[in-house]
Image (tube, helix red, strand yellow):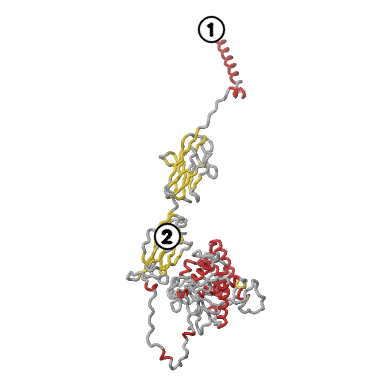
Amino acid sequence: MSAHFGRRLRKGAVNTTVAAVVVAALAASQAPDVTAGGRTGGRTAADAASGKGSDDSATGNSPYYTDLPPLNSPTPSPSQSTGTTPAATGDTEAGIPATVLDAYKKAAAALAEAKPGCNMPWELLAAIGKVESGQAGGGNVNADGTTLTPILGPVLDGDGFANISDTDNGAYDGDSTYDRAVGPMQFIPSTWEWAGRDGNGDGKKDPNNIYDAALAAGHYLCRFSWDMSTTSGLRSAILSYNNSTEYYNTVVSWLEYYRKGTHEIPDGTGSLPSSRSDDDSGTTTSPSSSSSASPSTTPSTTPSPSTTPSTTPSTTPTTPAPTPTETVDHLENAGTAKLTAMAGDAFTQTISARAETEAGQAVGKVRVRFTIVGDTDATFTGGESVAAIATDSKGVATAPALQAGEETGTFTVRATVVGRVLPALDYTATVTARAADTLAPTSSTALTCTAGGTFADQVEVKATYQGAVADKVAATATLIASAGDTTANDKGPYFKDAAGNAVRTLTDLRTDADGLLQLPTLYADDTAGTFLLRITTTGGATLTVELTVTAAPTTTPSPSESASDGSSETPSDDTSATESETATATASESATTGS
C-alpha cells in the first residue's frame, strides 16, 4: 500500500491476542475453514505461491493491511459525536465512508443481476476494501468516487515481493519498469486490463475510482462461478484475490464484523490501518509477519559488536536457482486444431500451449494466461474472458472450453506466460451464423383457399441441423413465380405487412427455441391455380410448400328469383314495343303498295 496512510505503528502483543481470539471465534462458529493452513509462524503453503514471478491474482499478491476488527460487535447506528475523533473501536471502526459504502452496495446489486449464482454480499467487498486500502484511505475520495491521491502498492521488483515487469508502460501506476498495485482495491495493471469495469457509468474504467474498482473486484471474485454463500466458494474466491491464508483469515474477520452491523460516515473520516503484512521490523507481533525469526531460531547469546564481522560470511551469497517461469523462452502451439463453432454453441476444439526453454525442453509448473481479445461475445466456461492455467509435466497448459456468443466473425485467444514479458502466442477462432440443414412441415394438411379468401391454416416448419434442433436460425419466405423461377410472384397468395399491403417476400424470420417457424396468415387474390411458397434458412435448408387457390363459385338466377325482384316487367314491356313496331311497319308497307 502507499505511504499516504502516514506512519505505520506496530500493534504489539495486543494485536496478536486480538487476532488469536477473533480467528478462534470465527473458526468455532461461522467460518469452519478460517484456520486452514494451521499457521503458527512463517509462510503457509498458500503463501508460498505468492513469491517471485507470480502475478496470478488481482493484486499480484501485494502486501495488505493486517489490522483486525475489535472484539466487541458493532451496532447498526453511529455513536454520538463528541466533537473529537473517536477511538478506532466499536461503532467507529464499523463505519464506512459514505461514497465507498455506496460503491460496495451498487456493485453487489449489479452482480445480483449479472451473476445471481455468485451471491455476492457487499460486506465481502467492504472487507477486501478494508484490508487492501483501509476503505480508500478512510474515504479519501471525491464525489465521483475517485481517490484524491493515488493509492499505489510497492514496486513489484522481486525484492520481497513478486517480480512483475511493467505491463502498462506506467499508464496506471506511473512506473514503466515494474508494475505496482493500483487504487482502493489494489489491482495490478495486467489484471485491470481485462478485469476493469465501469461502475459509475462515466464511460471509463479507472482503477482509482471506487465504483469502478468495487465492481471489478466483484466480477473478479465471481469469475469461476464460485458461490460466496458457501465456505468453499468464498475461500477459493478470496485466495484468488491474494494467495495467502493469513489474507483469507483477515478478510473473513472483517466480513463477519461488517455483517453484524455497519453504518455510513462522512467521506475522509474513516479510521486508517496501522499494520501491514510486509511490516517486519522488530519482533514478531502480528500473525501476518512472515519474515521475523521464530524463538527457536533466535541465538541464545548476542555477539558483541567486535565479534560481529567475524561471523559475517565473506563470500558472495549463492544465486538462487531460477524458477520454472524464469526458464521459459517461448510458447508453442500444443496441437490446437482449427477453432470454429456455430453461434451459441461450445467449441469442440481445445486450445493448448506448451512452455519451452530456448533448447525446446518442456517446462512444467508455469502459469499460462489465455485471454480472449477482439470484438466478440465469446467466453470461456464460466463466462469470463481470461483464464490462467498451470502447465503439466509435459509443459502443456490447456485453456477452458470456449463458448461462442451470438456475434459472428473471428477473434483471437492470446496465450502469455504469467510473470514474464515474452512474445504472445495467438490462436484465431471463428464463430459462424446459426444454421439449419433440414426443414420439414409440422402438418400434412393441404393448404387451400378460395380466390379472394383467407387460408385457414398457417404454414409452420421445423428446422434441424445434423438431426438436432436448429434454434434462432435466420430464414426467408418467398411466394415464387415457379419451381424454376425463384423471383417473387406478382399474383396469387400473399402476406400482409403492418400497413395491410400485400407482400410476397418475408425476411428477418428466425426459428424459435424449439426450431419452429410459423409464418403469418396467407391471403388469396382473385387468381385461381397452384402456387409455390419457398422457405430457405442460413445453412442451405430449403422447403417448397404447395398452395392451391380455387375459383370462386358462379351463381345463375332461378325463375323465382327473377319474379321476386320484378324483372318480369322488362320482357313484357319489350314485347309490347315489338308488337307496336311491327304494326307500324305493316301500315307503312300498305300505304306504299296502295293496298
Contact (Cβ within 8 Å) of mark 1 with mark 2: no
Q: Secondary structure at mark 2?
A: strand
| Rendering coords of residue 21 (x, y %) | 57, 78
Is the residue marked by circle 1 packed among few (<14), some (14-19), or many (20+) residues within 10 Å? few
The nearer-to-camera label among 1 and 2 is 2
**Residue 132 appears anywhere in the view:** no
Q: Secondary structure at mark 1?
A: helix
Q: Quadrant of the C terminus?
A: top right
Residue carrying label 2: 411
Residue carrying label 1: 593
- Toward the bottom, the furthest residue is 306
* Quarter of the image where one finds residue 305: bottom left
Look at label 1 and name its amino acid.
Answer: Thr
| Rendering coords of residue 237 (x, y %) | 51, 68
Look at label 2 and name its amino acid.
Answer: Phe
- Toward the left, the furthest residue is 359
| Rendering coords of residue 241 (x, y %) | 50, 70
Q: What residue appears at the point 57 percent right and 65 percent down from the top-left corner?
A: 106
Marks 1/2: CA distance? 112 Å
Residue 402 or residue 576, whichever sits in front: 402
**Residue 300 appears anywhere in the view:** yes
Work out whether 277 lies above or below 308.
Answer: above
Residue 95 or residue 221, whichever sits in front: 221
